[in-house]
Each structure stands twice: as C-alpha cells, then as structure tokens.
Image: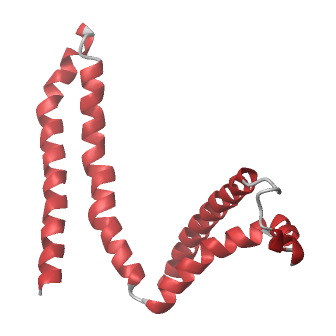
Amino acid sequence: MVEAFSLLAVGTSLIGTLLSFFEFFKEQLNNFTWQFPSTQLPQGNKLFGLRKWWGRNKSLTAMTMAVTPALFVSSTVPDAFSAATDIAGGYCMTILYGVLPPAMAWAMLNREAEDPEQKAFSKARPLLLGVGLFACCIVIEQVLQDILLFGS
C-alpha cells in the first residue's frame, strides 16, 4: 500500500511538472517561429521539408524537450530524486514556509504602521523577528551539514 501511494505521489508530481514544462516549451517554440520569418530561414530547410515538419510537430518537440532531460538524469543518476528531495526539504521548504511568512508579515506591518488601530500588531514584531531568525538558523544548519557531508 505504501509503495503504491509513493508511486502515485511521485507520478502526480512528475506529470504536473512535465505538463508545465511542455506548455512553457510550446509557447517558447511558437515565439521562436515568430522571430524568424520565412525569408531568413536557410534554403536547405525547405528542401528536406523541415519547415513543414516543424510547423506540424511543435508539440512533439516541446514534449521531447520536457521529457528527455528528466529521463536522461534518472537513467544516469538513480539517486538524483533523493538528493533533490533533500535539497527541496532542507532549503526550499524552510525558506518558503519559515522565512517568507514572517518577512511578509513584517512588510505588512510596515505598510499599515500609519493606521492607529494597528498598534496591537506592533507588539508582534519581536515574535516575527524570532520566528524568522529561527528559520534562518535552520537553513544555516542545513548548509553546514551539507558542507560537512561533502567534506568527508
């Protein structure tokens, strides 16, 4: 049961990422085509029918651009997923959920400081500072652990 859940969790993450990359690359390929009018393309492309193929298969090209790097990395470095989740958990999630919320609340307090009814929130500044510093300490601890791990 746990294996099935894990496989579905990884699969849904992969599908969402691949679909977003696919749409991004498809849009970039459409923009790339608009930048080069037919008069600027080399004549050799017309001979082999590459221009027609390119016009019909932008979706295939975009999907290949999205899938190939992930397939290559997963085939050559099987432990890459574990390393990526360690990095995402140790750095990205801590910054996203530990550092940014106190920083945003601090910015909100600075913006609303002119309002006299918001005086109660001014007492929250030490708490926000403490939570933000604690999250920064966790990030620093993770950096030090990773440096020591690479050193040994």
101 on left or right of 140: right
- How far from the left and from the top, in percent, is residue 109? 25, 24
Q: How many badges with numbers are in the image?
A: 0
Figure quadrant of residue 138: bottom left
Task: Name the residue nearer the viewer: 126 or 38.
Answer: 38
87 on left or right of 35: left
At horizontal 19% and vertical 52% (from top left) the residue drawn is 135
Position of residue 45 relative to residue 132, above or below, is: below
134 on left or right of 39: left
- How far from the left and from the top, in percent, is residue 36? 74, 55
Figure quadrant of residue 151: bottom left
Task: Name the residue nearer the viewer: 39 or 95.
Answer: 39
At horizontal 31% and vertical 51% (from top left) the residue drawn is 97
Most distant residue in the top direction: 116
The C terminus sits in image quarter: bottom left
- How far from the left and from the top, in percent, is residue 19? 64, 64
Task: Name the residue nearer the viewer: 92 or 6.
Answer: 92
55 on left or right of 27: right
Tell me how the rendering is colored: secondary structure
Figure quadrant of residue 48: bottom right
At horizontal 65% and vertical 64% (from top left) the residue drawn is 22
Task: Name the residue nearer the viewer: 21 or 28.
Answer: 28
Position of residue 65 relative to residue 116, above or below, is: below
Position of residue 112 relative to residue 99, above or below, is: above
Q: Is residue 1 visible?
A: no
Q: Is residue 135 visible?
A: yes
At horizontal 32% and vertical 66% (from top left) the residue drawn is 89
